[in-house]
Image (cartoon, rainbow, N blue to C red):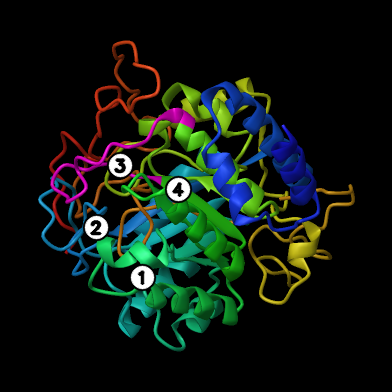
Amino acid sequence: MDLLNTLVDKGLRRELPTREEALAVLATSDDDLLDVVAAAGKVRRHWFGRRVKLNYLVNLKSGLCPEDCSYCSQRLGSKADILKYTWLKPDQASEAAAAGLAGGAKRVCLVASGRGPTDRDVDRVSQTIKTIKEQNEGVEVCACLGLLSDGQAERLREAGADAYNHNLNTSESTYGDITTTHTYADRVDTVHKAHAAGLSACSGLIAGMGESDADLVDVVFSLRELDPDSVPVNFLIPFEGTPLAKEWHLTPQRCLRILAMARFVCPDVEVRIAGGREVHLRTMQPLALHLANSIFLGDYLTSEGQAGKADLEMIADAGFEVEGADQVTLPRHRAAGAGVCGSHESAGCGSQAAGGCGSHEEPGAGCGSHWGADGGCGAHESAGVGVGVGGTDESVPTALDAAPAAAAPAATAGEPRTDLVAVRRRGAGTDLAPNA
């Protein structure tokens, strides 16, 4: 297809496709799907080789959010049956992080529900960041705490944070249909604050909320303009008890097209398959590795993910390799700019002493940063802790022991299937007390 040849050429040159070309990717037929994956895969391999970066989410504070984001199980008025607790203590968060790192993750994403942190919250998270870094050598830490006030990003950076996540989620024109308690402009402002503080910016989207193809292209083009180092692509988990509980619009094929479009528009950034991949990609997950160079390992914020062992087997079976802690993620040219993750000598985020992110010698060597969803930070349903809270001995499934999905009947081609994978609550079957 001339379209795909054009998009590959543009991707290798970091040239922005036209809106018409991006829309055309989303409109391709199932007959052309493997050609689309192969084309976007060329761009992915050019910048990132065959490496897959593993990230692990630690849910520092669950539920009790005053915002009304329609997709979120932690939202104001949510009737979703989820774990609810206040802040984990630094040692508890570090213990949770260690579970993910033991499974091969190189980045820990610290998430807290809520509109945004108070100054006291920033102090608390700063201590948690320091504790995690002291107890886990070489770990990258990304914070996702909601809307930032002036000076807070700088304080997180001083505490050792490498990155900050705040997703745009959907197009500016439809944002008010999803959330009313804050604005799209508020989210853009927080990404700018992270950039200005020298943090690696991470910002992405949620697909499957009833948006149009034009909305998807709008938000990905807006992300390209914001220039984050990492773009997590979440697929809506229709959580019972939320306004979007009945929104099942995605098929594995559509998810692949969305990931391919994101790769063509953002060729040299870390594209991460975030919340909802197990629910919507299902057995097609290995194909998505040809498009994205990063995934979450283990559970999400309020729902269970695929077992970590299954993720590692999937990566190996598909011919990819887990990115090591001593490898950098972003391509060399992205690391050269001020404020880019790992751009300073002895900086965090997997940088090397004399080079920083992307300092490999081989041409086109790549490497990136960040993540997924569900919470005040504007992610969608992304990964959770593997330790109990509130002093109980019971534990939530970790990255290495989440239960596999149950078998399902044969699928109907071309239609979303709501019966294939049940949304499983993280901590189901436990009685975890709030961590007061």
Q: Residue beneath label 2, please?
A: 62
- In this view, the residue farthest toward the bottom is 150
Distance between mark 2 and mark 4 Cα atoms = 32 Å
Residue type indicated by callout 4: Asp
Q: Earlier in the sequence, mark 4 or mark 1?
A: 1
Q: Quadrant of residue 16?
A: bottom right
Q: Earlier in the sequence, mark 3 or mark 2?
A: 2
Tell me, yes or no, if residue 16 can be seen here: yes
Q: Earlier in the sequence, mark 1 or mark 2?
A: 2
Q: Residue beneath label 1, please?
A: 146
Q: Earlier in the sequence, mark 3 or mark 4?
A: 4
Residue at 60% across / 63% down in the picture?
224
Q: Quadrant of the N terminus?
A: top right
* Disc 2 and disc 4 in contact, CB within 8 angstroms: no
Q: Is residue 294 left or right of residue 421?
A: right
Q: Residue beneath label 4, please?
A: 213
* Disc 1 and disc 2 in contact, CB within 8 angstroms: no
Q: Is residue 324 left or right of residue 194?
A: right
Residue type indicated by callout 3: Ile
* Disc 1 and disc 3 in contact, CB within 8 angstroms: no
The image's mark for residue 237 is 3
Asked if the magenta segment contains residue 336, the reply would be no
- Across and down, in percent, residue 241 comes to 13, 47
Q: Which residues are magenta?
A: 235-253
Distance between mark 4 and mark 1 Cα atoms = 27 Å
25 and 105: which is toward the camera: 25
Q: Quadrant of the C terminus?
A: bottom left
